[in-house]
Amino acid sequence: MSLKENLERIEEEIARNCRAAGRSREEVELMAVSKTHPITTLREAATLGLTLFGENRVQEFGEKALHAAAFRESCRNNALRAHLIGHLQSNKAARAVEIFDGIDSVDSLKLATRLNEAAAKLGKKLPILLEIKLSTEETKAGLDPHSPEAAQLLEALPALAQLEVHGLMTIAPLGVGAEGTRACFRALCTLRDTWAQSYPKLDFSVLSMGMSGDFPLAIAEGATRIRVGSALFGARSYAVQG
């Protein structure tokens, strides 16, 4: 199927699941996960009205960003946003701040501090999400919400003036079935509510959860942003490095 057809099908599915959950379609933002796909594919997606893109690697998007001006011109109202959703090493923070419009995978105070310093040098306000680990999988990145590190980060964030906290992001564990996946998403919602009350100076309005295989469950559990890649763009080519 073409990208246009895939997008139409996904939009129909989003709308259907929003109706089933008693929610408005406008409550759920679609992020197009464009990692490994060339800039030409991103331009095509932009002409179809998609303006929020998710990338996993600093180096890969850095190469795409060389063409960013033409890319942004192809977007409606020049509204393109590209966010980093993959794990970010603190030594790459400065470059990430330079090329991305937001970092959705902040998982430590050290990283947040580096991002704040880099954003200050650029005179830039940087939207961020906190990546939360709600599974026991060792390969999963993210912040343990019950750890001392989480408390330290949350206490420090209001003083990191260049960072704009917008919410939380998580990835459901593999192989747990629909109920396990829903439980993960439900846990993120509960955590959001708890932290919003405990840390009123921070904004937790964005819940980024749900991907190509499980976004209907995420919508049912309150996702405000879903990250869709393969269902939209098709199978990825991992020849791209970065």
Image: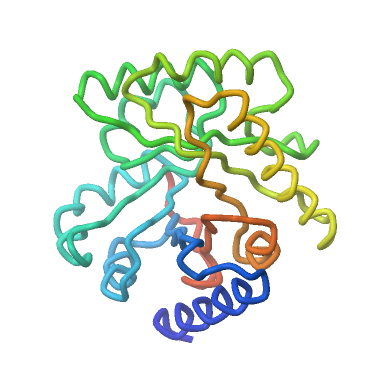
Instruction: Identify whether 92 is placed above or below 139.
Output: above
Query: Which quarter of the rendering shows the C terminus?
Result: top left
Where residue 120 sits, quadrant-wise, is: top left
Q: Residue at x 63, y 33 (%)?
A: 142
* Closer to us: 154 or 19: 19
Q: Is residue 73 left or right of residue 23?
A: left
Q: In front: 48, or 205? A: 205
Q: How is the image coloured?
A: rainbow
Residue 146, given in percent of the width and then of the height, sits at: 74, 23
Q: Residue at x 67, y 69 (%)?
A: 21
Q: How many marks?
A: 0
Residue 129 image position (x, y, % from top left) = 49, 37
Residue at 24% of width from left, 48% of height from top?
A: 65
| Image vertical order of residue 81 relative to residue 217, above or below | above
**In the image, residue 46 lies at what x, y percent?**
29, 68
Residue at 44% of width from left, 62% of height from top? Answer: 32
Residue 1 in percent (x, y) is at 49, 86
- Choose between 239 and 69: the one closer to the eye: 69
